[in-house]
Image: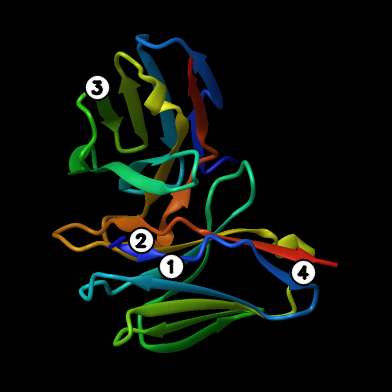
Amino acid sequence: QKEVEQNSGPLSVPEGAIASLNCTYSDRGSQSFFWYRQYSGKSPELIMFIYSNGDKEDGRFTAQLNKASQYVSLLIRDSQPSDSATYLCAVNGAGGYNKLIFGAGTRLAVHP
Amino acid sequence: DTAVSQTPKYLVTQMGNDKSIKCEQNLGHDTMYWYKQDSKKFLKIMFSYNNKELIINETVPNRFSPKSPDKAHLNLHINSLELGDSAVYFCASSQDLAGLETQYFGPGTRLLVL
């Protein structure tokens, strides 16, 4: 079982719709959860992080965490073509030192 | 001002050669990392350093040798390059070991081994 799993996509949504990206993780000891956006040929950039169960909103982005189900999601409201990118879910790994373990990413395509 | 910079941006070389990638951060961060992103876009940590001290060394072949001359610099030397080393290598830094939410990636070095 992969440590962090994401559907590779592509997830195709029309402009203005809500895009829902999902991620599951295997390590129950993980405490920190991150969403990165990566445009083609560019480096990952952090867009959201969440530590507690529930929802966290920042502009058009909402991260949702359910530790009991080992599930974290990212909602993008009013999707724009500029949101088209690969979204990487990452969790802090187990062990003595923090490190990020990434999923393989979900490619999002927002079409006009 | 570039926060995390890497040189070179592109590297094309023959199998068996030795090459180095340099990374510098001007954020005043204590912790630096090397990641490898393969052709399937899977991003995996290789090494982390905190104040020049090696902290994380994932199961990376010993042909890969990181070196941190000071906390603003982390270089990666690769000996006897193999085809499977072709990937994008990202340097990153964070405020400290616990500050994963401050982690900032460099632009990447695209390595192609022929």
Dot placed on the residue nearer the N-terminal end, 2 or 3: 3
Q: Which mark is residue B100?
A: 2
Left or right of B111: which side holds B97? left
Q: Chain of mark 4?
A: A
At mark 4, the secondary structure is loop
At mark 2, the secondary structure is helix
Q: Tell me whether marks 2 and 3 sit on the same chain.
A: yes
On the image, the x and y values in percent for residue B23 come to: 42, 32
Report the Cα–Cα distance between label 4 and label 2: 28 Å
Q: Chain of mark 1?
A: A
Q: Are marks 2 and 1 in contact (CB under 8 Å)?
A: yes
Left or right of B55: which side holds B64? right
In this view of the protein, can residue B89 be seen by the observer? yes
User: As shown in the figure, which amino acid type bears the numbered disc 1?
Assistant: Phe
Which residue of the protein is positioned furthest toward the right in this rendering?
A: A112
Q: Say above or below: A104 vs A63.
A: above
At mark 1, the secondary structure is strand
**Is B103 in front, or is A16?**
A16
Report the Cα–Cα distance between label 3 and label 4: 44 Å
Q: Quadrant of residue A21?
A: bottom right
Q: Give the labeled residue for mark 3.
A: B63
Q: Which mark is residue A80?
A: 4
Q: Quadrant of residue B65?
A: top left
Q: Say above or below: A20 vs A93.
A: below
User: As shown in the figure, which amino acid type bears the numbered disc 3?
Assistant: Arg
